[in-house]
């Protein structure tokens, strides 16, 4: 499958799968309110961290190394199972302490059941990696969409029928069961299952790559989620609920948008990693196309946050508006740093991410902890923005310049062109919003989205023609020229 077709399938997967998850999160939040959504945030945090770590970076190792043997794959598969069981046991032990840290008694009952997913995920982790390696994103999209549909349906129906937080737990388990079942069916048809083995000596290079990738992933999650831990522990469940909802509307959406490109960029860069000019061109293109989407979404959302929040979530969530606006700025800055992941992994530098995130661990948590001492959520977000603005500058020297050579102007222009278009759109919306809100929340939201889209499109045709044309071409059959 070509890279363009792969991007299209990944885009379809993300739009539908993550759209369903986002819809369920918003509808559940509207019913349960900020306090209960703080509990949901902790559940999602524990699940995200443990599932990512339990993979041990082995999926990325399988994609990076050209031809792993069946015995190596069997060894990696066995390691996945052992790690899944380890994290299942770990959550059983930590459930009660976590409930005390976040002052949420419900966590002690819910987390042991949430941990069952760690016994399910190893079933299809390797199959998913092998299908990504062969660029079969069309079949992966079907599996992912099916699981997300079940997840969202169970969560929404359960909450509306009074089952509360248990609906979230059941939704996660059933959604995972559907995905793993689909992957096993695909594996049997394509003969992708390699059994079990423990030949560590023959798998040393893959395990070493996975070890560094796991360390980097774990540290990245810790650095990016320590803010939630601090907010929940110091500011309370309601503040954590607000913060998590702002993250869902911004950070989680950005991560899925970035994943559309990075899922394809990683195996693609790995294939021509020795051709540095080609890698540089692919990276600039990746930065520009991803920023083209992110700038439109998050600059626009920051401007129209007030009517959108009141329309979608209701008056109980009014305190979300300032947090959401600040989160949009933070996420737009952070989206650039995330794109170094596929570049470093594709070039075989998994250890770089590990050391980088280890250094950040000494810097980010103390700054956020100090900002939380004031007891004001917005202070935490301002600290996040300051951190990310600083890191964006240093990332170029630590990552980009060392991997693909001096390229400051090309790198900056790739991101600044769509950012300029977003600023033009933002200014037009800012000065027109006072007149739009007089028409009512529903009409002002629809009109602002339409008018903002038109302004962004026109500005992009002037300043970022190639980027907007390629993004729009995902809707059509013809792929753009490379």
Image (cartoon, rainbow, N blue to C red):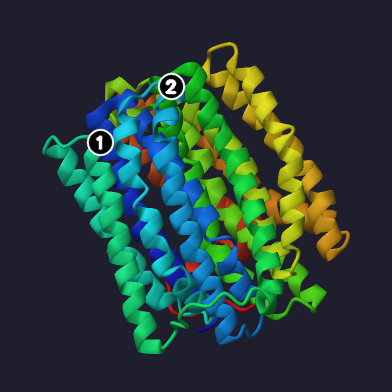
Seen at 39% across and 30% down, the residue is 96
Looking at the picture, how far across and down is residue 140, in whole percent? 40, 73
For residue 132, side relative to residue 286 (left or right): left
Q: Between 306 and 445, which is closer to the camera in this rendering?
A: 306
Query: Can residue 76 be spotted in the picture?
Result: yes
The residue beneath circle 2 is: 239
Seen at 77% across and 47% down, the residue is 395
Q: Identify whether 102 is placed above or below 259.
A: above
**Gap between marks 2 and 1, in whole Å?**
18 Å
For residue 283, side relative to residue 163 (left or right): right
Query: Can residue 312 be spotted in the picture?
Result: no
* Residues packed near mark 2 inside 10 Å, few (<14), some (14 to 19) or many (20 plus): many
Q: Secondary structure at mark 2?
A: helix
In which quadrant will I find the C terminus?
bottom right
Q: Identify whether 381 is placed above or below 183.
A: above
The residue beneath circle 1 is: 165
Q: Between 252 and 350, which is closer to the camera in this rendering?
A: 350
Q: Identify whether 188 is placed above or below 330.
A: below
Residue 464, located in which quarter of the rendered image? bottom right
Q: Residue furthest top?
A: 374
Seen at 16% across and 37% down, the residue is 163
Looking at the picture, how far across and down is residue 432, in whole percent? 45, 30
Query: Which is nearer the N-term, disc 2 or disc 1?
Result: 1
Looking at the picture, how far across and down is residue 414, in whole percent? 71, 56
Q: Residue furthest right?
A: 406
């Amino acid at each position: 499958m070509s890279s363009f077709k792969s991007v299209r399938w990944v885009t379809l997967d993300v739009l539908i799968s993550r759209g369903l998850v986002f819809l369920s999160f918003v509808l559940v939040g509207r019913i349960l309110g900020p306090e209960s959504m703080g509990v949901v945030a902790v559940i999602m945090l524990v699940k995200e961290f443990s599932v990512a770590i339990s993979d041990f970076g082995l999926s990325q190792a399988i994609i990076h190394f050209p031809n792993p043997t069946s015995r190596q794959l069997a060894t990696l598969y066995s390691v996945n199972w052992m790690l899944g069981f380890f994290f299942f046991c770990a959550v059983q032990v930590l459930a009660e302490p976590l409930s005390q840290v976040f002052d949420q008694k419900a966590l002690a009952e819910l987390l042991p059941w949430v941990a069952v997913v760690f016994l399910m995920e190893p079933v299809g982790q390797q199959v998913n990696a092998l299908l990504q390696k062969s660029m079969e994103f069309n079949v992966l999209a079907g599996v992912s969409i099916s699981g997300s549909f079940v997840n969202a349906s169970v969560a929404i129906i359960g909450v509306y029928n009074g089952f509360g937080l248990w609906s979230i737990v059941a939704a996660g388990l059933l959604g995972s069961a559907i995905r793993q079942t689909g992957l096993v069916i695909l594996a049997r048809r394509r003969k992708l299952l390699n059994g079990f083995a423990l030949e560590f000596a023959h798998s040393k290079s893959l395990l070493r790559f996975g070890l560094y990738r796991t360390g980097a992933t774990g540290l990245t999650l810790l650095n990016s989620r320590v803010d939630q831990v601090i907010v929940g522990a110091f500011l309370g469940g309601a503040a954590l609920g607000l913060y998590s909802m702002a993250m869902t509307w911004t950070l989680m959406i950005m991560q899925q948008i970035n994943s559309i490109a990075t899922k394809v960029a990683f195996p693609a860069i790995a294939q021509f990693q020795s051709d540095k000019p080609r890698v540089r061109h692919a990276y600039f293109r990746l930065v520009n196309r991803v920023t083209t989407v992110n700038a439109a979404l998050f600059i626009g959302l920051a401007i129209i946050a007030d009517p959108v929040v009141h329309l979608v979530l209701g008056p109980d969530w009014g305190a979300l508006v300032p947090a959401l606006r600040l989160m949009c700025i933070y996420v737009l800055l952070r989206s650039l740093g995330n794109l170094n992941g596929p570049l470093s992994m594709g070039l075989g530098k998994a250890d770089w991410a590990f050391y980088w995130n280890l250094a950040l661990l000494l810097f980010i948590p103390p700054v956020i902890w100090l900002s939380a001492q004031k007891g004001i959520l917005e202070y935490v977000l301002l600290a996040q923005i300051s951190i990310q603005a600083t890191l964006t500058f240093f990332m170029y020297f630590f990552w980009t310049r060392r991997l693909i050579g001096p390229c400051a102007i090309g790198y900056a222009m790739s991101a600044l062109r769509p950012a300029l278009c977003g600023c033009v759109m933002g200014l037009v919306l800012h000065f027109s919003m006072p007149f739009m809100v007089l028409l009512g929340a529903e009409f002002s939201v629809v009109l602002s989205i339409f008018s903002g889209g038109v302004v962004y499109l026109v500005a992009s045709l002037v300043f970022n023609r190639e980027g907007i044309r390629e993004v729009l071409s995902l809707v059509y059959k013809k792929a753009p020229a490379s």
